[in-house]
Amino acid sequence: ELPSDLQPEQMSVVIEHKKGEVNELKTSLRNPTIDRDPDKKREVIKRVIAYMTLGIDVSKLFSEMIMATSTKDHVIKKMVYLYICNYASTNPDLALLAINTLQKDCRDEDPMTRGLALRSFTSLRLPNVVEYLPSVIRTGLQDQSPYVRKTAVMSCVKLHVFAPEALKDSDIVNTLYTMLRDRDPQVVANCVCALNEILAIDGGMAINKPIIHHLLNRMREFNEWSQCIVLELVARYKPTEQQETFDIMNLLEERLKHANSAVVLSATKIFLNLTQDMPAVHSQVYARLKPPMLTLMAGGIFEQTFVCLKHIALLTSRAPEVFTDDFKHFFCRYNDPACVKLLKLDILTQISNSSNVGETIEEIAEYVTDPDTSVARGAVAAIGKMGVRVPSCGGIVVEQLMKFLEVDIDYVSAEAIISMKNLLRKYPDRIERFIHGVGAFFKNIDEPEAKVALLWMIAEYGHVIPESPYLVEPLIDSFAEEQSQAVRLELLSTGVKLFFRRPGEMQLMLGRLLDAAIADASFTDVHDRAMMYYRLLQHDVGQADRVVSKAGPVTGAFVEEAPSELQDRIFEEFNSLSVVYGEPAERFIVHGKSARELDAGTDTVAEADVNGPNANAMAEGAHSGGGGAGGGSGGD
């Protein structure tokens, strides 16, 4: 990354590249007058970095740039280090010239210089440099400056990526465990990150009770992002006693009131994980988590609202009763984006019950005229789902769906018919309200999915719909013109089922339908199903009726709405992208060779004994309070 004073607006004067300018820069870098003037020297090096950024080869200035490190100006040093790291891989022989300079700067009296030099030294990634790195890093880990120590900690990760064998042969991992009781909280957070990365193949850093309690007792010292790192570690910990579980939850109670949403969600995950095996406490935890989740949802930018709603939706799928009384919080605002509105509709569907469904349906009905098609369709679908979930509101839902069919909006009418089908799947006795309107629906619907829903209704209730054979006849006659495979398949099923109910009227129609389907090979599935029906009828009409028409009432939730193993796996990955995507991590994270495996050609990682002397020292530090937070400036 370029220094802050090397952004494009400051570099506009050097964008024009003239022939021979690199030689001029070389002359300028050697000019004693410029060398004595820090401002002029800084401008010359800025031009070198600008050319390098543009892709111009300035590697011939390597010797002069190394000589430029003999300065107390941190800006110049940072630019020179950037130059050295950039050309180290393409000019390894020249980079060796920088080793002595970097080693010398690692021992400089200025902690900022030591930190910059250490960071650049461990970024060279040259085979010839590896032998120097462990000792340099070890020295940095023992430095008096917090900035140098936290830079050294992150340098351990670089060494692990580039040369894992060198890390394994050293005692750096054990040193990192010891440094978990460092007086500076940022150093501790960096140690946790480094250990998790280095020991990733083993599931992350090893944890025990002293480590966890030490980190929890120092929680207030960490900044909000470091708190997230620590909380993610605590989420992996399994207490051995119930009292310890309650102690941890008491220590984290304040985190649920934090202003940062990441901290709140991280603490939420811990509360849910800790009480997983305590059903009574687990239900109380849901109630305790409700206020902070609703607060996060109501404030901030819509991206934060969306993420928070995703997590609330996951919680309501497991405990819908928790948010039942607060259903009005999920009513859509006029300025909510479509993604947020759709999520709120899903949540309202989950938490609907006999006490709030009337008011909820009345509110959602207003969204049907939303300019966004997906929101309008989602509103109709949500009302239909409420009718399925809450039996007592069936009459209200049926009347509302009939009103939607009168709305002169094609996609609203189509979605209403699809919702009717789902309602009839669960409550077949509600067909009486739809019987006389089915014929009119056929004339106004062109959407394939809605056509499939109407055909299903005719197939299931053809015996009570007087004109049912004559409603499907136009579709049978235009079978070859139908472009939707789903409609063709449903038409075949409808024709066969209707034949068993109205054989006299359907016999000739079914013959024409099967002939057309068997003769047309444009859809293999349609052709195969037509052949199956034909052979069933040819074998035994009675047996065919028993096979095709056999159906039973739906007594529980639909398969697509029932709790699944997938939801449980997503719940285990709470506070991650898995919740946002609605998929387990393994489905969107490609597990191939990592960068370190490709670079080093090995899977070996360093190991540490957390039950050994360093862990005992860690425990002593935890019980002694861990010391105060140290100062320090800068970052890595």
Image (cartoon, rainbow, N blue to C red):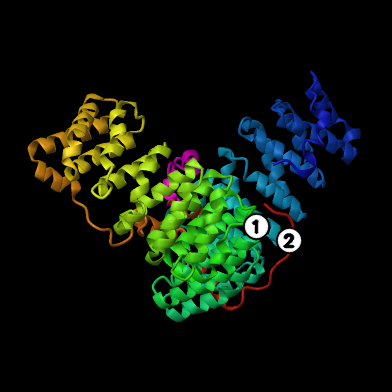
- Residue 71 shows in this picture: yes
Question: Along the polypeptide, which appears first: circle 1 or circle 2?
Answer: 1
Residue count near mark 1 (Cα–Cα under 10 Å), binned few <14, some 14–19, many ≥20: many
Residue at image coords 49%, 65%: 358
What element does badge 2 sit on?
Answer: loop
Residue at image coords 50%, 46%: 407
Task: Magenta stretch: give its range.
Answer: 584-609
- Residue 40 vertical placement versus 272 (above, below): above
Frontmost residue, 220 versus 582 = 582
- Residue 168 shows in this picture: no
Residue 615 position in % (x across, y down): 50, 69
Residue 278 within the segment the image draws in magenta: no
What element does badge 1 sit on?
Answer: helix
Residue 252 position in % (x across, y down): 56, 73
Residue at image coords 50%, 43%: 596
Residue reaching furthest top?
A: 19
Question: What residue does disc 2 label?
Answer: 632
Residue 191 position in % (x across, y down): 58, 60
Number of disc labels: 2
Residue 32 position in % (x across, y down): 89, 33
Frontmost residue, 89 versus 279 = 279
- Residue 401 vertical placement versus 254 (above, below): above
Q: Which mark is residue 150?
A: 1
Q: Amino acid at mark 2?
A: Gly
Q: Amino acid at mark 1?
A: Lys
